[in-house]
């Protein structure tokens, strides 16, 4: 496999509302555009507990997961395979919060190995690509150190006001990028539309489960809240250490995430006009605006326009992006870059 591939929308069912912003970006229409708040792009990951839901289909009928497993060196490159085997080490989503998401957090690699038999936990990052409403906000981490016993009582009583009130509350706008390390409690507010990068799992420990999930078991994924809360970061955080605000940064290539994110994934905004050379890499491209082309050393040429999502295999080789485009480029960590 050497040719980049445009991907259709891939919106597995979720428990919360949203999707209109995804439909608008992709130019979709119809009665269902307000539902399906997550578009899993170039996904080799399934929804938690599911056999296939969440996986990206390719034009030849295979799942992307199976294509990568069949020829990991072509898709990912030898150096990546030496470190991550046949995992892409990345999941990209378009996420449109049509309502506030519940307070939740994700396990670290070590916790996921012990409790979920997974090489990966779920560190993630949000690149804000649109907002709606009067006051779009995100909630990254506790404002101050919080007693675990107090948190346990909030979870037992489902004290939503206390949980949300203990978190940082940060206004965001297009161009902001928020890093969410494993363990950090967080929520996304209504009206925030993001490109999300994350480790390739679907482990969410949801401490505010009432009015969102059917049962507390779905909140703790069957391990019990006493165990799940051991993965929670109860320290206080200055949210500005987690955020880069890049809307006004000029240049063809702008790194979007704080330095600590590079061990988990990489993201930059590309404005190639007239042209920009890109090194070989497994890459996911999300075209936010404009028209242009992607020319690759071994995979030919692909026209690009607003709303396109594209997966580029490593074997496509050196490439050139050209035209009046704004593109978010998402990549796994560089080999040897893990902390």
Image (cartoon, helix red, strand yellow):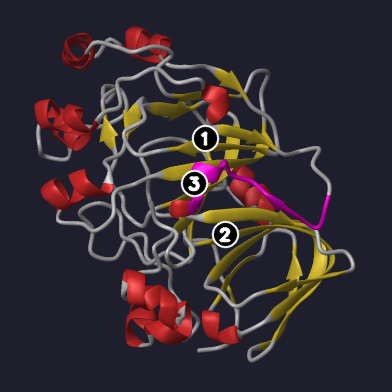
- Give, as a single range, the part of the protein colored magenta: 251-262
Label 1, label 3: how far apart the Cα atoms are? 23 Å
In the rendered structure, are the residues bearing label 1 and label 3 in contact, judged by CB atoms less than 8 Å apart?
no
Is 119 on the left-hand or right-hand side of 75?
left
Instruction: Say which residue appears at 55% left-offset and 74% top-offset.
Output: 281
User: In terms of secondary structure, where does tag 1 sit?
Assistant: loop
Q: Is residue 196 above or below residue 218?
A: below
Mark 1 sits on what residue?
97
Which is nearer the N-term, disc 1 or disc 3?
A: 1
| Residue 166: quarter of image | top left
| Residue 322: quarter of image | bottom right
- Indicate which label's residue lies in the foreground, 1 or 2: 2
| Residue 298: quarter of image | bottom right
Mark 2 sits on what residue?
330
Q: Residue 261 has which mark? A: 3
Is 226 on the left-hand or right-hand side of 310?
left
Magenta run includes residue 257: yes
Label 2, label 3: how far apart the Cα atoms are? 12 Å
Instruction: Say which residue appears at 36% left-offset and 25% top-offset.
Output: 103
User: In terms of secondary structure, where does tag 3 sit?
Assistant: helix
Which is nearer the N-term, disc 1 or disc 2?
A: 1
In the rendered structure, are the residues bearing label 1 and label 2 in contact, judged by CB atoms less than 8 Å apart?
no
């Amino acid at each position: 496999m050497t040719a980049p591939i445009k991907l259709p929308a891939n919106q597995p069912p979720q428990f919360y509302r949203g999707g209109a912003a995804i439909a608008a970006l992709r130019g979709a229409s119809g009665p269902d555009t307000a539902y399906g708040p997550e578009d899993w792009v170039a996904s080799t990951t399934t929804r938690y507990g599911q056999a296939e839901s969440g996986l990206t289909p390719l034009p030849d009928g295979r799942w992307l997961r199976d294509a990568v497993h069949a020829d990991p060196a072509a898709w990912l490159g030898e150096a990546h395979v030496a470190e991550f085997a046949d995992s892409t080490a990345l999941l990209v989503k378009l996420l449109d919060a049509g309502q506030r998401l519940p307070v939740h957090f994700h396990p670290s690699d070590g916790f996921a190995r012990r409790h979920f038999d997974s090489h990966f936990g779920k560190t993630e990052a949000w690149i804000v690509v649109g907002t709606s409403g009067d006051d779009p906000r995100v909630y990254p981490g506790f404002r101050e150190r919080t007693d675990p016993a107090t948190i346990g009582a909030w979870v037992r009583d489902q004290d939503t006001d206390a949980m949300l009130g203990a978190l940082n509350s940060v206004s965001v706008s297009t161009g902001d990028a928020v890093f969410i390390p494993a363990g950090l409690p967080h929520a996304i507010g209504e009206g925030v539309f993001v490109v999300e990068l994350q480790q390739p799992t679907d482990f969410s420990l949801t401490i505010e489960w009432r009015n969102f999930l059917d049962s507390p078991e779905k909140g703790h994924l069957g391990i019990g809240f006493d165990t799940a809360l051991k993965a929670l970061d109860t320290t206080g955080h200055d949210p500005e250490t987690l955020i880069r605000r890049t809307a006004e940064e000029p240049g063809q290539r702008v790194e979007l995430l704080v330095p600590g994110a590079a061990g988990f994934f990489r993201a930059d905004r590309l404005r190639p006009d007239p042209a920009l050379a890109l090194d070989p890499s497994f890459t996911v491209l999300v075209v936010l605006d404009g028209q242009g082309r992607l020319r690759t050393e071994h995979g030919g040429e692909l026209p690009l326009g607003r709303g396109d999502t594209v997966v580029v295999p490593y074997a496509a080789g050196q490439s050139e992006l050209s035209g009046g485009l704004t593109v978010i480029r998402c990549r796994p960590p560089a080999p040897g870059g893990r902390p």
